[in-house]
Image: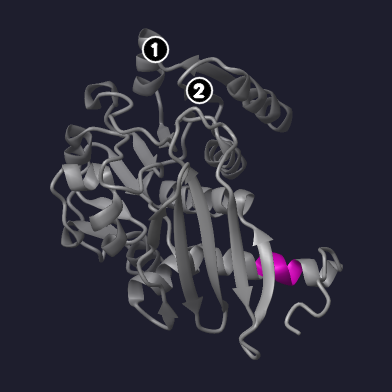
Amino acid sequence: MASVFRRLSTGSDYASPHRTTIAMSHHTALFMPSRVKDVGTAIKVVSVPTSTDDKRGLPASTVLMDEETGCVKAIVNASALTALRTAAGSVLATRLLSKPPISLVAFGAGKQIEAHVDLHIRAYPSIKRCVIVNRSRNMRLENLLSELRRSHPLVTLEGLAADDTSDVRSAVSHASVICTATSSTHPLFPSEWVSPGTHLNLVGSFKPGMVEVDCDLIRRAGTIVVDSAEACAVEAGELIAAGLRAEDMVEIGRLVEDRQGGLQGETQMRKGDVTVFKSVGVGLQDVAIAEHVVSKAESLAVGTIVENFHV
């Protein structure tokens, strides 16, 4: 993901037009085409349920193109890959913007949060406690906690309902890192609950009307780090509400470029008492991970081959 973000920020050898959004009867369909030179060309389609009662997850597929023939090379179930590539970006941001965390708080109970918690714990053995906050203590949350406990028996994992105000406030105030991946249209918690030094990864909102944190918290961060300034300026509800423009943001690829080029600190950033990474997702990530998965599948001879598909 680091190389993908770096290429995005340097503007070199890629095409990634703004996503197209179409309203369906029960979903919002997102179409995200991208091409990365020497990597591949793909389009991902994601359907986001319009009802908060729909618990079936986000249907997603990536169509990968053959660079030589122009034909479709592969169709990949992208639901798990979308969560994985987004979480990988957040872990990169945590590494660049925060000290090794001890405690993690996550809002949501879907695949995005599962991937965020799992990758953060794998990347940081320093994490000893994780609290997952969901709208309610439902079976979805309990199943997620059970799965994560099996994978990470040495980490204390706890679930909370959003209306357990005092417990949620305590968890947020003691968090080293907070990850949010919800479809909320109002702040999940007030800025005053967040302690100085906390790092936040915000990946839920992708429309102007969606917000996961309040304007005060955005302003506390000084310079906001984003995956794509162009996309976040028109899609990230929290940043739009706070009056931020593309020029007020710093892309994570610029920080990667500084680090890899030995220029740490070269990019000018206004310091605040918290750090924030906002991601709306970029198609370059989908091209990279889909190409990797298809290449791996070919080497292992797994998957289903459809004969005469283009005849």
**Residue that appears at 61% across and 68% down:** 63
**Residue that appears at 22% across and 40% down:** 218
Label 1 element class:
loop
Give the quarter of the image for residue 254: bottom left
**Residue hosting label 2:** 131
User: Can you give x and y, in whole percent of width and height, for residue 52 in the image?
Assistant: 45, 30
Is residue 229 magenta-colored?
Answer: no
Q: Amino acid at mark 2?
A: Val
Q: Nearer the viewer, residue 13 or 63?
A: 63
What's the colour scheme? one colour
Give the quarter of the image for residue 9: bottom left
Q: Amino acid at mark 1?
A: Asp
User: Can you give x and y, in whole percent of width and height, for residue 292 in the image?
Assistant: 66, 68
User: Can you give x and y, in whole percent of width and height, for residue 297 in the image?
Assistant: 78, 66
**Residue hosting label 1:** 163
Using a 10 Å C-alpha cutoff, classify the residue at mark 1 as few (fewer than 14 neighbours), some (14 to 19) or many (20 or more).
few
Main secondary structure of the magenta stretch: helix
User: Which stretch appears magenta?
Assistant: 292-296
